[in-house]
Image (cartoon, rainbow, N blue to C red):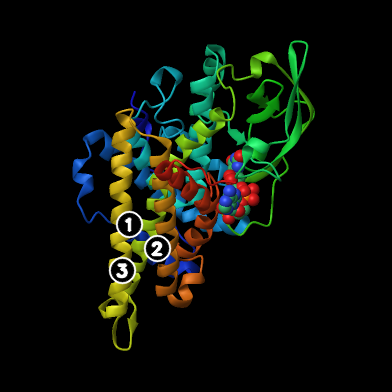
Amino acid sequence: MHPLSRVCPRPRKHFPESCASARLHLMEPYSSLDFFGLEQGLDEDHLMVRDAVRAWVSERFLPVVAEHFEAGTFPMDLVGEIAELGVFGANLPEEYGCAGFDNVAYGLICQELERGDSGLRSFVSVQGSLVMWPIFAYGSEEQKQRWLPALASGEKIGCFGLTEPDFGSNPGGMLTTARRDGDDWVLDGRKMWITNGTISDVAIVWARAEEGIRGFLVEADSPGFSAPEQKKKWSLRASITSELVLEDVRVPDSARLPGAEGLKAPLSCLTQARYGIAWGALGAATACFHEGLNYAKQRVVFDKPLAGFQLAQKKLADLATRITCGQLMAYELGRLKDAGEVNPDQVSMAKRNNVELSLETARVVRDMLGANGISLEYQTGRHMLNLESVFTYEGTHDIHTLAIGEALTGLPAYR
Ligand SMILES: Cc1cc2nc3c(=O)[nH]c(=O)nc-3n(C[C@H](O)[C@H](O)[C@H](O)COP(=O)(O)OP(=O)(O)OC[C@H]3O[C@@H](n4cnc5c(N)ncnc54)[C@H](O)[C@@H]3O)c2cc1C
């Protein structure tokens, strides 16, 4: 059965009366900016995926996201519904319980999820691109059979532990170690800024062994393993971020990803996730653009709608142009990925460009909303804060600049 056919319409949640402006805004039907008619090139399956995720985000996620953002929680009660959409590991094969979508469909999913919140897209990106994909690409058949269906159905949640307190942009310096002891491995170290860590059943932990960097599937109940939550974030608040602490954690050799050798293994996972971010960021950008355009048409200043002033039109024209350039890049990237021709530098360029334009869109629209722009009854301020994290994670803006610079010149300028 097609995963999306399991999705049935659900009742629309009502806003408390006090949220009048949010209710007004969110009930307006959403249609993404598509200035060049790119969506006309989508086939029926793509449109079905896009529409199903879009409807779910509108009906089930947007009504609750602001309260989760305020509380610093992720809506765990929605995980089953997210799984029913078929979005966990959506571009992995059906034989492992996944949807088997192509990469354009996967991109559209990320775009629609991030229209809701970058925390929602992060949840799905980590589960699919950073946990399921490495198991699919580097795992044994036994690991695939055991973990992929459970992760696809949302029965199990995973996280990806690469970053450490002293090594983010340069993960090759990692201090976490994996020491061979008979048939087992003993892991020691500390990871930081790990999405979903506290709520995970399994962590993919990257550690330095004598042979080089290796990846391990560490189950959350392993003695010596803990994942305390990192609090006091003002960005990606509707997403759980954690430390991973590994103190003499013993795992069998069957928990090692046998195909993962060296730093290129975790970096290849990041390329998968960055692909999703390049699309996802456009969802945040179009959410803000839509909010800004509607607001400017309705808000009367100096006796006429804000949208009728040249300054406002210049802002909207600039944003629409940048978003359209980002969409062209994402669609082309999707086609290259489906043809098996995409390279990591192209993914770097798209991640860098599309996150930057989204952050810029959020900042400009935040301004256009005036004081309302700082209220959680509107979406743009929340997207703006989230996108600061997206600008930094999965390779900072600078690191992608250097990757493109190296691709162009042949000269690495990282050190
Ligand atoms: C909300 C959130 C969720 C995250 N989730 C995960 C996760 O699930 N798993 C995971 O492993 N990690 C995760 N991360 C970590 C993220 O990937 C790192 O924060 C990121 O790679 C940057 O590393 P850093 O924070 O150590 O910054 P640093 O590497 O210390 O960078 C600091 C500054 O220096 C600049 N810089 C670094 N190197 C150079 C250079 N060579 N030349 C010029 N400038 C340079 C950077 O661009 C940046 O501006 C997450 C981070 C956040 C904020």
Q: Mark 3, residues whose alpha carbon is within 10 Å: few (<14), some, or many (≥20)?
A: many
Q: Amino acid at mark 3?
A: Leu
Q: Is residue 313 above or below residue 96?
A: below
Dot 2 corresponds to which residue? 361
Label 2 with label 1: CB-CB less than 8 Å: yes
Q: Amino acid at mark 2?
A: Thr
Name which residue lies at 32% across and 59% down: 322
Name which residue lies at 49% across and 61% down: 384
Q: Earlier in the sequence, mark 1 or mark 3?
A: 3
Which SS class for mark 2? helix
Q: Image quadrant of residue 228? A: top right
Dot 3 corresponds to which residue? 316
Q: Is residue 341 left or right of residue 401?
A: left
Q: Image quadrant of residue 219? A: top right
Residue 143 is situated, as x and y percent measured from the top left of the image, at 57, 17
Which of 169/163 is in front? Answer: 169
Dot 1 corresponds to which residue? 323
Which SS class for mark 3? helix
Name which residue lies at 74% across and 15% down: 184
Q: Amino acid at mark 1?
A: Ile
How far apart marks 2 and 1 lie (CA) works out to 8 Å
Q: Which mark is residue 257?
A: none
* Disc 2 C-beta below 8 A from ligand 1: no
Residue 131 is situated, as x and y percent measured from the top left of the image, at 54, 30
Name which residue lies at 69% across and 36% down: 174
